[in-house]
C-alpha cells in the first residue's frame, strides 16, 4: 500500500510542477506582450523591437495590401518598414487592448483601436492580435480585423 501511494504521488507532483511552470511561462508572455503595447503607445520603436525576435513575422490582412499595409513582414526591418507606411495612410491611431488571454506560447489580445483618417474622420474599430512567443520574445504577431471597415475609414 505504501508503494502504491508513493507511485501515485510522483505523477501528481510532476503534474503540479508542470502546471506551475506553464503558469509562469504564460505570466512572462503576458508581461512581454503588455510591454509591446506600452512601447507602441509611447511610439518607442526600439522598445517595441526589443520585445520581438529578430526574425519575427508581422502579419496583417492581405486586404490591406493596396495601402501598403497587408501581408507578412519579416524581421525587425520588416516591422520598421510597416510602421513607416502607417502615417501615409492614417492620420492617427491609438490601440486599446482590453482583454489578454494566454495559453502556452500564445497570447490573444482583444481590443479596439481609435483610428483617424488623413482627412480627419475618426472611428473605433475592433481588433484581435494573436501573438506567438518563444524564448522570451514574440516570433509572430497577427493583426485580425474587419478590412472593409478599415477601408471605409481610410477613404472617408
Image (cartoon, helix red, strand yellow):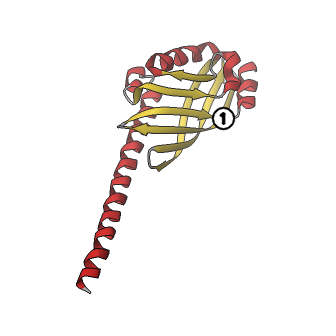
Q: Position of residue 105 (x, y in %)?
A: 44, 44
Q: Residues within 10 Å of mark 1 (few under 14, many from 20)?
A: some
Instruction: Work out whether residue 76 or residue 67 is closer to the camera in this orientation and state it.
Output: 76
Q: Residue at x 36, y 26 (%)?
A: 50
Q: Is residue 24 above or below residue 65?
A: below
Residue furthest left in the image: 2
Q: Relative to 10, is 64 on the left or the right?
A: right
Q: Image quadrant for the N terminus?
A: bottom left
Q: Is residue 119 visible?
A: no
Residue named by callout 1: 145
Q: Residue at x 44, y 49 (%)?
A: 104
Q: Is residue 91 above or below residue 19?
A: above
Instruction: Work out whether residue 127 or residue 153 is closer to the camera in this orientation and state it.
Output: 127
What SS does tag 1 mark?
Answer: loop
Q: Specify the quadrant of the image occupied by residue 11.
A: bottom left
Q: Is residue 82 above or below residue 25?
A: above
Q: Residue at x 70, y 16 (%)?
A: 66
Q: Position of residue 116 (x, y in %)?
A: 64, 24
Instruction: Work out whether residue 4 or residue 40 is closer to the camera in this orientation and state it.
Output: 4
Amino acid at each position: 500500500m505504501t508503494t502504491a501511494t508513493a507511485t501515485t504521488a510522483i505523477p501528481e507532483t510532476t503534474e503540479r510542477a508542470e502546471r506551475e511552470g506553464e503558469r509562469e511561462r504564460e505570466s512572462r508572455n503576458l508581461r512581454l506582450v503588455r510591454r509591446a503595447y506600452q512601447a507602441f503607445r509611447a511610439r518607442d520603436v526600439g522598445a517595441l523591437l526589443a520585445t520581438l525576435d529578430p526574425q519575427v513575422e508581422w502579419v496583417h490582412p492581405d486586404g490591406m495590401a493596396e495601402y501598403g499595409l497587408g501581408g507578412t513582414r519579416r524581421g525587425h526591418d520588416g516591422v520598421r518598414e510597416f510602421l513607416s507606411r502607417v502615417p501615409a495612410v492614417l492620420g492617427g491611431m491609438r490601440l486599446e487592448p482590453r482583454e489578454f488571454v494566454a495559453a502556452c506560447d500564445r497570447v490573444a489580445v482583444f481590443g479596439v483601436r481609435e483610428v483617424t483618417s488623413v482627412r480627419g474622420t475618426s472611428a473605433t474599430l475592433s481588433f484581435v492580435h494573436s501573438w506567438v512567443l518563444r524564448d522570451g520574445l514574440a516570433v509572430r504577431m497577427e493583426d485580425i480585423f474587419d478590412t472593409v471597415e478599415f477601408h471605409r475609414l481610410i477613404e472617408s
